[in-house]
Image: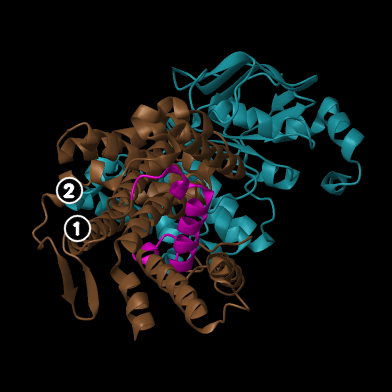
Amino acid sequence: MPDATTLANVEHVPGVAKPDPILVADGVVRRFGGLTAVDVAHFEVQRHTITALIGPNGAGKSTFFNLLTGFDSAQEGAGVFDGRELKGMSASNVARAGMVRTFQLTKALEGMSVLENMRLGAQQQPGENILRAFAAPLWRTREREITEQAMTLLARFKLDAKAHDSAGSLSGGQRKLLEMARALMTKPTMVMLDEPMAGVNPALTESLLEHIVELKDSGMTVLFVEHDMHMVRRISDWVAVMAQGKLIAEGPSHAVMANTAVQDAYLGAHHDTDLSEEN
Amino acid sequence: MNIATDVLLQVFAPATAAFAIAAIGLNFHFGLTGLLNMGQAGFMLLGMYGFAIAAREGLPLWSAVLIAMGAAVVFGLILGWPTLRLRGDYLAIVTIAAAEMIRFLGRSQSLLDLTGASVGIRGKDYKFIFEGLSFFPDERVTILWFTMHGTKSNSWFLVVVAWILVLLLAGGFWRLSKSPWGRVLKGIREDEDAVRSLGKNVYWYKMQALIIGGVIGAFGGIVWALGASVQPDSMGRTTTFWIWTILLLGGAATVFGPVLGSIVFWCSLMLIRAVSREYIPDSIMPTTAVEPFSLVLVGVGLMLLVIYRPQGILGNKKELAFHA
């Protein structure tokens, strides 16, 4: 549901300032040789909202995602997350700061059980230090807490029956759920979802959407990349559109979809895809 | 009967223990972390040099062992610093080259005073610091059907010490692989970006795995050197491939896989050698061809293993299989 209170007075122009941004990107440029993949002048994500990042294939959404989460580094510009400078921060430090991501190509750790996948997401486990690992009493208590947290989350994502199965035995949709649940084990303040609905069957899409809304309800901020405009319209408070590396539009979903620049960007390159249902 | 005792002796021979130890080290690299270290023989050789040179110069046993470990740590750091950012196959290429560099450096005439160049270091120059501690008699001892020297070289004393070491290291592997630390390494083996996204410093964990596995490899080298001598060419690429065969045969990521793998490997090698020496007439296979022939069979065995049981004898196919 669009959040009327916080974003109601924000103008619908790309790069607009928000009342309480958790994430700010400024002048971020990433070039691959001669190709400028990302060139975002300014972008802010409002705290406690669901923001969708959309755009045609090759718009630079995933690259922008990688830059924000520390998986790639920009040649110019920088981001600030929750008051912390992101420039030069490694991907693991970004995650520890509270911004956790998932991947477009789901990364379930297939050789491990579902529960072990979950436990891996937990922070502050002293047993992850090699010396303390030898002395089980030093980490057993924390391990019990982690397991409890993991089982609660798995129950919420309806994966608790599979806890002891190998993650490799899960279906594609279940892997998406596992990846999201595992990300939540880090107790993030912001969740970055890279195409969470890609390759998921319609029934599971419903439950994924509900889970994303739940994230917001429990106080997190969500930024997600998506192709499917229907999904975007149903759950996002705010939509940002990228095309050819640049941010070309921002606003609530209805305003963005009426925007001619967005229609050009999508229909110009994509007149045979999903957007045809809008006609 | 002779063949039977020869083969059975390999179940507990010091060489079997030495390779089991080196394979436990490789298990930290490959089994837990997925690092394709193709230079385990280099770690072993460094351990041998560190130990033997320190002993020859009159240092006590504990400091000789520490120097061997230190050499492996330094090698691991130098090797890991640039290469752990590389993926899979690239790491394999760099490690195989680095191990060869250690071997050629050891063989180099300019280091004759230190390493003994291609001749190496004779056993009597360094074994005394270990053999002096023996509680076995200083003569040949027969236990059951097996006769070995009590104290010297491939001795009962070395058998006891080496297998205690094997058990300690296997126990250490068990403890660590079942700890949260081991879980992070297994995660890295499956997908390091996923682990990075969960806030773990992947590079540092890989470095720890490389070093700990390398130090264990150095222990394997010491045990080998105490049974044989320090000879750079005995720790070439072939040795690394044998260790890989042992690990994959027994089952990577398992606690006793490296131990069982080493036992099966050395017993089969001995069986093939003994049988072909005994029963195949010289006109068909001269004695000089026995050794290459047994290695050919080892190669065939490894191929069959990868095709029909890619997870090894003890391995879990769901967790880790050698899929080519």
| Residue B254: in magenta span | yes
Left or right: B35, with A274 as reference point: left
* Figure chain in cyan: A
Q: Position of residue B120 (x, y in %)?
A: 38, 40
Q: Position of residue A103 (x, y in %)?
A: 60, 43
| Residue A23 visible to an observer of this rendering | yes
Residue under label 2, please give it: B130
Query: In terms of secondary structure, what is the magenta stretch mainly?
Result: helix
Q: Are marks 2 and 1 on the same chain?
A: yes
Label 1: chain? Answer: B
Label 2: chain? Answer: B
Q: Which residues are magenta?
A: B229-258
| Residue A172: in magenta span | no
Q: Position of residue B264 (x, y in %)?
A: 41, 72
Q: Quadrant of residue A240?
A: top right
For residue B161, the mark is 1
Question: Looking at the figure, which quarter contains the N terminus of chain B?
Answer: bottom left
**Type of residue at label 1?**
Val
From mark 2 to mark 1, how far is it between C-alphas?
Answer: 10 Å
Q: Residue at x 75, y 30 (%)?
A: A256
Q: Quadrant of residue A174?
A: bottom right
Q: Position of residue B86 (x, y in %)?
A: 57, 36
Label 1, secondary structure: give it. Answer: helix
Residue in the foreground of this view, choosing between A87 and B170? B170
* Figure chain in brown: B
Q: Residue at x 20, y 57 (%)?
A: B152
Q: Quadrant of residue B48?
A: top left
N-term mark: 2 or 1: 2
Residue in the foreground of this view, choosing between A47 and A245? A245
Mark 2 is surrounded, within 10 Å at the Cα level, by few (under 14), some (14 to 19) or many (20 or more) other residues, namely: some
Q: Nearer the viewer, mark 2 or mark 1?
A: 2
